[in-house]
Image (cartoon, rainbow, N blue to C red):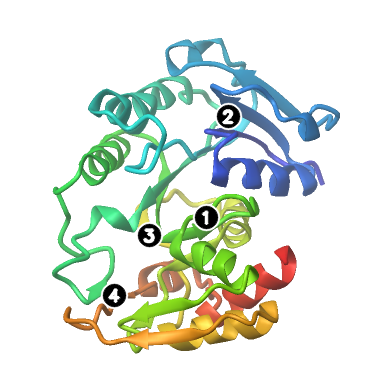
């Protein structure tokens, strides 16, 4: 059976490059859009077409027969270029351009990779799609605006709010779990604050790929937003100790009493699991899979 043609914006980013790898391996015809040159490892893969373009030139892209679009673009506080204009260009104006070029008969659905950081994490223990929004950073504000642009369009969409994402690039030390893994690999001493807090704010790029591919088969229209995160929390100290065992690390793990309140943020994924009848893996499963596949 012939696979759908898809387009991935932000294809050279940490998440985008993994999705290009997974979808191309599953023989989808993948159009990639990025401001960076095509990585050498993709140049000989026939089902990948690479566009090196700024968003103002997106209209040059041949969108014929493209059925799905995945927007992986995004500027964060830790990005190399993170001035206000960068946030506006990447988190808002790119979305406007995407909406313009996907208006054709063959196109079916837009997937927007957003963030749980748009929610107020400081004042809420339980985070779900109805949680109070945060307006305390350029990142959360511009991501909220870009999501609203899509919601107010006529296009079918799935907005995916992501926690910290484990990518396959070992040299990239975000999110926090990858920083800890790096310390464990070098047998460094690790101090843990709020070690008894519950933690499930994690997902890997393979699960993002699996979920999006699963929804490709849904013929009915979808216009909604969902949190995509690990299903069941782990106690943070147990998560680090398990990582230590899997990596055969000699690091000393020390719990330090914090003056702050217990930093529990439990991410709820009930809406996604119920809507799609899709079971997300637990924090333990994601951690084990990521370490076993990459280390």
1 or 3: mark nearer the eye: 1
Q: Is residue 147 above or below residue 190?
A: above
Q: Position of residue 81 (x, y in %)?
A: 37, 29
Give the Cα distance between marks 2 and 4.
41 Å
Nearer to us in this view, 293 or 62:
293
Give the Cα distance between marks 2 and 3.
25 Å
Which numbered circle lies on residue 226? 3
The residue beneath circle 1 is 173
4 or 3: mark nearer the eye: 4
2 or 3: mark nearer the eye: 3
Give the Cα distance between marks 1 and 3.
26 Å
Under circle 2, the secondary element is loop
Give the Cα distance between marks 2 and 1.
39 Å
Q: Position of residue 132 (x, y in %)?
A: 15, 61
Give the Cα distance between marks 4 and 1.
21 Å
Q: Position of residue 113 (x, y in %)?
A: 44, 47
Q: Quadrant of residue 51?
A: top right
2 or 4: mark nearer the eye: 4
Which numbered circle lies on residue 265? 4
2 or 1: mark nearer the eye: 1
The residue beneath circle 2 is 106
Q: Which quadrant of the figure contains the C terminus?
A: bottom right
């Amino acid at each position: 059976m012939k696979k759908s043609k898809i387009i991935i914006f932000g294809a050279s980013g940490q998440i985008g490059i993994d999705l290009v790898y997974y979808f191309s391996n599953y023989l989808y015809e993948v159009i990639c859009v990025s401001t960076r040159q095509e990585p050498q490892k993709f140049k000989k893969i026939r089902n990948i077409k690479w566009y090196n373009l700024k968003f103002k030139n997106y209209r040059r892209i041949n969108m014929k027969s493209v059925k799905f679009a995945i927007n992986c673009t995004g500027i964060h506080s830790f990005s190399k270029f993170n001035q206000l204009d960068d946030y506006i260009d990447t988190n808002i104006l790119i979305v406007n351009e995407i909406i313009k070029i996907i208006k054709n008969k063959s196109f079916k659905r837009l997937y927007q990779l957003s963030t749980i950081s748009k929610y107020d994490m400081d004042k809420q223990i339980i985070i779900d799609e109805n949680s109070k929004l945060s307006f305390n950073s350029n990142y959360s504000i511009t991501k909220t605006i870009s999501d609203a642009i899509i919601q107010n369009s006529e296009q079918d969409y799935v907005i995916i709010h992501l926690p910290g994402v484990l990518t396959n690039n070992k040299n990239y030390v975000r999110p926090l779990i990858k920083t800890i893994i790096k310390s464990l690999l070098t047998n460094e001493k690790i101090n843990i604050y709020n070690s008894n807090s519950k933690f499930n704010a994690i997902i890997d790029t393979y699960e993002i790929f699996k979920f999006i591919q699963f929804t490709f088969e849904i013929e009915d229209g979808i216009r909604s937003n969902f949190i995509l995160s690990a299903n069941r929390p782990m106690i943070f100290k147990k998560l680090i100790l398990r990582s230590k065992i899997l990596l055969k690390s000699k690091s000393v793990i020390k719990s330090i009493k914090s003056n702050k309140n217990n930093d529990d943020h439990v991410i709820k994924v009930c809406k996604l699991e119920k809507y799609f009848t899709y079971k997300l893996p637990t924090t333990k499963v994601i951690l084990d899979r990521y370490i076993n596949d990459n280390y």
